[in-house]
Image (cartoon, rainbow, N blue to C red):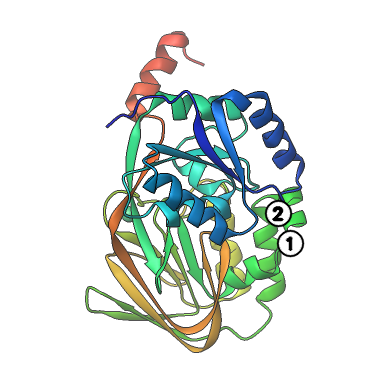
Amino acid sequence: MFVNAASRYPLILNPRARSERAQRARRFVMENATRFAIYATNTAEESAELARRFSEEGEEVVVAAGGDGTLNAVVRGLIGTETVLGILPTGTMNVFARELNIPFGHLAGALEVIDGGHVKEVDLFEAEGTPFVQMAGVGFDAQVIEETTTESKRLLGPLAYILSAVRVLGSEPPRMKVHFDEGFTVEGACVLLGNGALYGGQLRLFGKADNADDLLDVLVYKKAGYTAALGSLGTAARGGFEADGKAVEYYQTSGLTVESDRKVPVEVDGELWGRAERVEFKAMTEKLRVLAPAERGKNWWEQVLANLNPGGN
Ligand SMILES: [Mg+2]
């Protein structure tokens, strides 16, 4: 499905973002000011309401300029509407943009994707009524997000999460029961959920994930020990992940409920959602429509590369 490029897109922007990347993004938006009607918002609620209003006014596309938090807010506003989301990734991690292969270091490229008009339909899931498009977590990963500063994220990228994990893992791990909709229960100390494959930047944690298959990919950490967590994150950082069945188990499900022996932090799309003893995750009936590059098979790329470099090497 395609939408036509607009001469001017409504653009929702978080003006408080202070990073160098955010400033570069604002400059890009100003340099392309004729392409956007710019709306600055101060809170996630404002971003969601604004997106909803644009949709009600009949806008075909609404562009969000920001990181995963801003995107999540705009997505919430667009749920159940016909309006398509455009993304100018200007955050620190931009996990959802990376998942969709939207250029994240090159805003002119991201604008080309928006103008290209190729619409992808993506599954939406919710945690106790809060929608998410990319990932969620219960336990130490959420605690890590709670304790990882924006500054360290900027400096260290995904490594910041790992370093914070080392700091928070000292406490005794919670005991969780994970009840899957398919009718079985497993125990663990931390649960990570992926709609897409990527988690926390370029970590391809959910190797089998497809964000358009109606399934949530789930990692259950059997014990929140240093070895388990660091071992698996380290493996993921090196480009692959194999659940070994002892420290971590991998599932695909239509939904699940996590019950913990105490209140544990919960994160949704990289933002702290809150603390709870029981959290239900389930699919939403609505899909997100988002502008993304058309997907091409790996073989296509291999062919291109082979043609470019017929001699090999
Ligand atoms: Mg899926």
**Residue at figure coordinates x 52%, y 50% from the top left:** 71
Instruction: Say what secondary structure mark 2 lies in.
Output: helix
Q: Is mark 1 within 8 Å of ligand 1?
A: no
**Could you tell me the amino acid type at mark 1?**
Thr
Q: Is residue 158 above or below residue 140?
A: above
Q: Residue 55, how many percent across, how many down? A: 39, 46
Query: Which image quarter holds the N terminus?
Result: top left
Q: CA distance from mark 2 to mark 1?
A: 6 Å
Q: Is residue 44 left or right of residue 136?
A: right
Q: How many discs mark residues in the rendered view?
A: 2
Label of residue 39 in the image: none
Instruction: Please name the residue that numbered disc 1 is placed on.
Output: 149
Q: Residue 184, how many percent across, how many down? A: 26, 79
**Residue at figure coordinates x 49%, y 32% from the top left:** 9
Question: Can residue 40 be seen in this snapshot?
Answer: yes
Q: Is residue 59 left or right of residue 63?
A: left
Q: Is residue 253 above or below residue 175?
A: above
Give the crowd class for mark 2: few <14, some 14-19, many >=20 residues within 10 Å.
some
Q: Residue 252, how many percent across, how many down? A: 31, 62
Q: In the orientation shown, which residue stands out farthest toward the front?
A: 57
Q: Is residue 225 left or right of residue 288?
A: right
Q: In the orientation shown, which residue stands out farthest toward the left?
A: 182
Q: Residue 152, how many percent across, how many down? A: 75, 56
Disc 2, disc 1: CB below 8 Å? Answer: yes
Instruction: Please name the residue that numbered disc 2 is placed on.
Output: 153
Instruction: Say what secondary structure mark 1 lies in.
Output: loop
Q: Is residue 16 above or below residue 87?
A: below
**Could you tell me the amino acid type at mark 2?**
Lys
